């Protein structure tokens, strides 16, 4: 279960999305995160995912390494464009 949390988090899933995907309560997901932090000695999710990758607990081909899903959703709804496509 811990590795599934790490994989989903690495792929940009929030705690709520992880809970929905794994059919768990958000409270249970947070309990799992505390256990992951303790076992890996991590301070936050990004650090835990990086440590799991370095230690070989999850493989790079299992991870898309992209921004969290909420960033994509907010950028799409706001109609933001990259700097290269903007005109000055």
Image: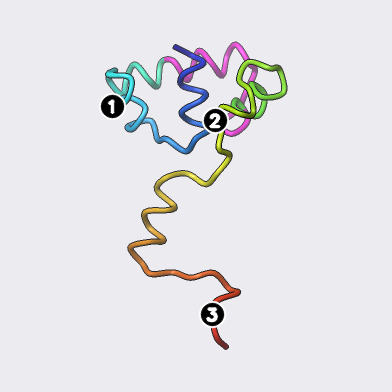
Residue 36 covered by magenta stretch: yes
Q: Position of residue 59 (x, y in %)?
A: 63, 23
Asked which quadrant contains residue 73, the reply is bottom left
At a point 72% along the width and 23% down the height, the residue shown is 54
- Which of the two residues, 30 or 72, is positioned nearer the viewer here? 72
**Which secondary structure, mark 2?**
helix
- Which of the two residues, 5 or 28, is positioned nearer the viewer here? 5
Residue 45 marker:
2
Instruction: Tell whether label 1 touches label 3 (CB within 8 Å).
Output: no
**Which secondary structure, mark 1?**
helix
**Which secondary structure, mark 3?**
loop
Question: Whole-Å distance between the Cαs marked 3 and 1?
Answer: 37 Å
Q: Position of residue 69 (x, y in %)?
A: 42, 45
Q: Position of residue 32 (x, y in %)?
A: 44, 15
At a point 71% along the width and 17% down the height, the residue shown is 55
Question: Whole-Å distance between the Cαs marked 1 and 2?
Answer: 18 Å
Chain-order first, disc 1 or disc 2: 1
Q: Single out the mark in the foreground, 3 or 2.
A: 3
Question: Whole-Å distance between the Cαs marked 3 and 2?
Answer: 33 Å
Q: Which residue is mark 1?
A: 20
Task: Count residues near mark 2 (Cα–Cα under 10 Å), then give few for <14, some for 14-19, many for 20+.
Answer: some
At a point 47% along the width and 20% down the height, the residue shown is 33
Q: Which residue is mark 3?
A: 86
Task: Count residues near mark 1 (Cα–Cα under 10 Å), then give few for <14, some for 14-19, many for 20+.
Answer: few
> What span is in magenta?
32-47
Asked which quadrant contains residue 53, the reply is top right
Magenta part, dominant SS = helix
């Amino acid at each position: 279960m811990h590795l599934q949390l790490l994989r989903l988090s690495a792929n940009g899933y929030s705690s709520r999305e992880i809970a929905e995907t794994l059919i768990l309560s958000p409270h249970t997901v947070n309990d799992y995160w505390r256990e992951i932090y303790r076992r890996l000695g991590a301070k936050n999710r990004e650090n835990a995912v990086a440590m799991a990758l370095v230690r070989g607990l999850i493989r790079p081909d299992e991870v898309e390494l992209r921004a969290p899903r909420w960033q994509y959703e907010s950028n799409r709804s706001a109609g933001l464009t990259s700097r290269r496509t903007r005109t000055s």
